[in-house]
Image (cartoon, rainbow, N blue to C red):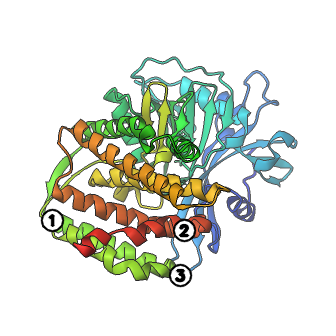
Amino acid sequence: MMMPLPTPSALEAYLVRTRWFGGKGRPFHVMGVRPLARSLATEDAIWRGRSDDETAGPDVVVLIVDVAYEDDQGGAESYQVPISTYSVSQPRIDHALVGVFDDVWAYDAVHDRDAMALWLKTFCRGTQEEPFESDGMRFHRLDVSGVQLDADAPSSPLTVEQSNSSVRFGEQTIMKLFRHVQTGVNPDIEIAAELTRAGSENVADLYGWIEGEFDGAVVQLGMLQRFLRASTDGFDLALASVRSVLADPSLHPATYAAEARELAKAIARIHLVLRERFDQTVLGTDATLALANGMRERLDAAILVVPQLDAHAPRLRALFDRVAGLNSLAVQRVHGDLHLGQALRTPDGWRIVDFEGEPSKPLEERRRLDSPWRDVAGLIRSFDYAPAVVQMSSTEPNDDGRSRQSDAWAHTARGVFIQAYAEELGTGGLTEDEAILLDAYIADKAVYETVYETRSRPAWVSIPMTAISRLGRAEETA
Ligand SMILES: Nc1ncnc2c1ncn2[C@@H]1O[C@H](COP(=O)(O)OP(=O)(O)O)[C@@H](O)[C@H]1O
Ligand SMILES: O=P(O)(O)O[C@H]1O[C@H](CO)[C@@H](O[C@H]2O[C@H](CO)[C@@H](O)[C@H](O)[C@H]2O)[C@H](O)[C@H]1O
């Protein structure tokens, strides 16, 4: 018997309730529901829950849901929605109910620990030499550290801010299922695999990944990594540091310096490995002009969404013009979307996650060579966010003393970070060209943030706007 699929209208109602659907607020409809792997179409009992008791576990189907947008921008996207189904309701996962179809109760399988156990068990059946093939999905293993996967570890979905859906298995592994899927190589898997093979101590080791096929091409659906136990999110750590400095004026803003230094070294080491394991090259004036033009275009587009940017546009354009005047641009693979929330402080040092790049860009664009100063700029923007977020959530008035302490905190973190990054790369500090690139990437990221905050957290738009009001002032008066 074939399991009934959720209807397009039920999926439309479900998508808008999720954190990961990128089309919220836009008119859209579901134009296709494609089963990529359908448990009942296979004899393989593993997809049917506990094989000794077939009535107990869920049946699982992995759907690709195709969405078409109906606004002027138009376009289409595909989302991965794994569904687990039961013949009776499952109150424990009511919040993940997609609908009831022909008396079959369909839930988002990510929230169903019995369904997620099937993914882990399936991973455990493959080896590095021989990926396990199950009903159109291939489970690849990468076995660099020789870790024994615990097939019975219980799953729990992560509740932190995320663009995809991650599930932790016990204290050992974490599996991320990509939600917005595109055919081709996903840089999150590609880069984590290379860093793991290189023995990098600054990444969460990759243990495996999942592939399927649609539109006649390979699609990468998810990845299994080492779960970093006892880790602290780098942004939370920065917030705690700012709070302690503001609460106790006898503490110097440099109390965070050791963390900033170690983080900079970790990023530099990652950049060095990426240089070794992927292409790197030095591009000429065509590339610097194209980079500057890209930044100018993003600014023009951002002004349409955030009109108050217009008043600052001449100073921002002047920063981008300086990039257009550079003779060369050293490029390599980079993280592409780095901020403190993707840096995890573990007891044995900093590890970086989420090498996916900006999820809204096509995969091929995200895999392009770029300047590592884009990543450095991303972190520097986070050093500016941390004091601003502390101030916004504090009941204390922002007097001059607190403002000075906050500015000093961000200034110190930035200075220490750049110095340590350059030292780890074996250079004394920033060259004049690198300083021009860094300033422009910081401005470009702040412009992007004004749009991101306007759409996602309007109350925070003042954070990048305040930064933008200061950017380029030194050059203006020089
Ligand atoms: N290997 C890991 N160990 C522990 N926590 C992790 C790990 N990978 C990610 N996380 C946590 O999950 C959050 C989201 O991960 P991320 O890879 O950024 O997902 P997304 O692509 O969905 O945004 C991170 O900010 C971090 O808090
Ligand atoms: O984590 P994502 O890849 O989805 O990145 C998006 O969300 C980030 C916020 O979660 C956002 O980052 C901005 O806010 C951070 C504080 O919450 C701050 O540390 C970053 O510097 C700032 O850019 C990111 O821009 C956005 O793409």
Give the Cα distance between marks 3 and 1.
Answer: 37 Å
Give the residue number, with chain letter if any, for mark 1: 326
The residue lying toward the viewer, choosing from 141 and 41, is 141
Is residue 439 in sight in this rendering? yes
Residue in the image at 50% along x and 77% along y = 306
Q: CA distance from mark 2 to mark 1?
A: 31 Å
- Mark positioned earlier in the residue sequence (3 or 2): 3
The answer to whether mark 3 and mark 2 are in CB contact below 8 A is: no
Dot 1 amino acid type:
Leu
**Of tags 2 and 1, which is closer to the observer?**
2
Task: Name which residue type carries label 2.
Answer: Val
How far across and how far down the image is residue 463, in percent? 51, 64
Residue 318 position (above or below residue 110) = below
Quarter of the rendered structure image containing ligand 1: top right
Query: What element does badge 2 sit on?
Result: loop
Image vertical order of residue 140 relative to residue 431, above or below: above
| Residue 42 lies in quadrant | top right
Q: State whether label 2 is within 8 Å of ligand 2.
A: no
- Disc 3 element: loop
Q: Amino acid at mark 3?
A: Asp
- The mark found on residue 461 in the picture is 2
Nearer to us of marks 3 and 2 is 2
Residue 71 against residue 248 in the figure, above or below: below
Residue where numbered disc 3 is placed: 72
Comparing 405 with 463, the one in front is: 405
